[in-house]
Image (cartoon, rainbow, N blue to C red):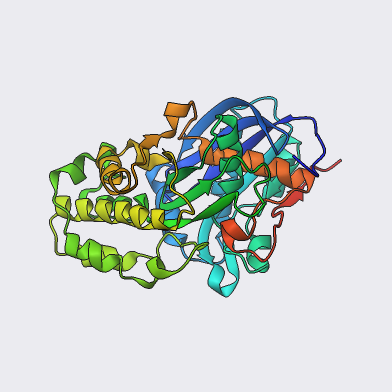
């Protein structure tokens, strides 16, 4: 890549605890922060129901309790202890509150704790610098998506869709070598994904999520609610743009009178409709939409996505596994890749991904004591 010197690739461990609150993903990537040379071991450390309850009690707060911080750091340490041979850690922490329009975002957890435990540098607090420079602070995976598109040998624009607690879309032109260059990327949050469904399933059925979309398949979406939801101001904002996990709580209120199955089907349809609307912003139609995150396991959601996206754009909707990637660990891998970029002083976001005023490298680095 022009202007970027070569660096020796190293094994980096990335950590992700997302808004679905299911647990900690850790994964290793051999990278120089520009290219991906190999994928390493990975591990998932689930959160117990009492641990999830503690997270839910503090969602929306701008300062986590000591108890929650200790849980986050301990859970990540337990997960990382299953990996060997890494020389750097990328630690995302747990997002409790995200309000970039007012210049603030908060990920709980202290990377310095992990630096001491594992005796390697830890890159963390990835979002604050971006928000301080007027960006949305999210999504941050797009620079990794750009590297993935080139890694899989894509020769025309493709898109990656992460369906976690919130949905986010990255459009990539792999023909442009530098992800920070104009035209290489466009990224933004599409709307709610799994979070509203998970919350409703827990509240009504005592279940953590709708496994395989089986419950949604039993119901009938209320398309009047879906259509009304798409009239919310967020869907009229131009990207880049981002969301907090709870920004669409009103949609859960809207399905309160529906049966359990119809309510879940409606929330699932709303998530798919947000993605279909988001595709209108792509500079050119992508040749494929690769889906990552837990939502790709939801057969009903994937069917709805195919109907709304593939039907309009002739763009196949595919799980990332079809191109040899791991959709369960892709977000954790992303923070490994970004950590290496921070180590090298390379940007991790740009105007086309977060709306930040200029390409910027986020993250602060904690080194272990001598």
The residue nearer to you, when weighing 16 against 301, is: 301
Q: In this view, does 9 lie to the left or right of 102?
A: right
Above or below, 87 relative to 262 = above
The residue nearer to you, when weighing 326 against 28, is: 326
Residue 11: horizontal and vertical position, in percent? 70, 29
**Image quadrant in which you'd find residue 286:** top left
Residue located at (61% from left, 40% from top): 175
Residue 89: horizontal and vertical position, in percent? 68, 39
Q: Tell me the quadrant of the picture where the N terminus can be found.
A: top right
Residue 15 in view of the camera: no
Residue located at (50% from left, 48% from top): 171
Residue located at (53% from left, 62% from top): 240
Above or below, 201 relative to 23 = below
The residue nearer to you, when weighing 149 against 348, is: 149
Residue projecting furthest to the right: 370
Residue projecting furthest to the bottom: 102
Residue 245 in view of the camera: yes
Q: Is residue 277 left or right of residue 73?
A: left
Residue 223: horizontal and vertical position, in percent? 18, 60
Q: Tell me the quadrant of the picture where the C terminus can be found.
A: top right
Residue 269: horizontal and vertical position, in percent? 25, 52
């Amino acid at each position: 890549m022009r202007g970027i010197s070569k660096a020796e690739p190293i094994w980096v461990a990335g950590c992700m605890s997302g808004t679905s609150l299911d647990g900690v993903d850790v994964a290793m990537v051999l990278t120089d922060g520009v290219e991906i040379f190999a994928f390493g071991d990975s591990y998932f450390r689930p959160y117990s129901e009492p641990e999830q309850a503690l997270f839910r009690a503090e969602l929306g707060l701008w300062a986590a309790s000591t108890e929650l911080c200790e849980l986050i750091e301990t859970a990540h340490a337990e997960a990382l202890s299953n990996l060997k041979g890494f020389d750097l850690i990328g630690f995302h922490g747990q997002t409790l509150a995200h309000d970039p329009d007012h210049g603030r975002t908060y990920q709980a957890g202290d990377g310095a704790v992990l630096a001491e435990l594992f005796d390697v540098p830890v890159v963390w607090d990835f979002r604050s610098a971006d928000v301080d420079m007027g960006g949305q602070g999210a999504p941050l995976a797009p620079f990794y998506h750009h590297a993935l598109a080139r890694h899989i040998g894509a020769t025309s624009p493709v898109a990656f869709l992460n369906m976690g607690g919130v949905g986010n879309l990255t459009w990539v032109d792999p023909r442009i070598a530098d992800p920070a260059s104009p035209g290489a990327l466009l990224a933004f949050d599409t709307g709610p994904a799994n979070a509203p469904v998970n919350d409703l399933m827990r509240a009504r059925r005592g279940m953590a999520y709708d496994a395989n979309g089986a419950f949604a398949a039993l119901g009938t979406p209320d398309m009047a609610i879906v259509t009304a939801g798409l009239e919310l101001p967020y869907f009229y904002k131009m990207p880049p743009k981002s969301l907090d996990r709870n920004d669409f709580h009103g949609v859960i209120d809207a399905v309160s009178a529906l049966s359990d199955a119809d309510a879940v089907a409606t929330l699932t349809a709303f998530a798919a409709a947000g993605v279909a609307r988001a595709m209108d912003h792509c500079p050119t139609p992508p040749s494929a939409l690769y889906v990552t995150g837990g939502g790709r396991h939801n057969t009903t959601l994937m069917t709805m996505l195919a109907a709304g996206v593939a039907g309009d754009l002739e763009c196949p909707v595919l799980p990332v596994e079809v191109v040899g990637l791991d959709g369960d660990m892709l977000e954790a891998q992303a923070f490994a890749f970004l950590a290496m970029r921070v180590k090298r002083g390379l940007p991790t976001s740009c105007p086309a991904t977060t709306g930040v005023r200029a390409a910027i490298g986020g993250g602060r680095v904690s080194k272990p004591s001598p």
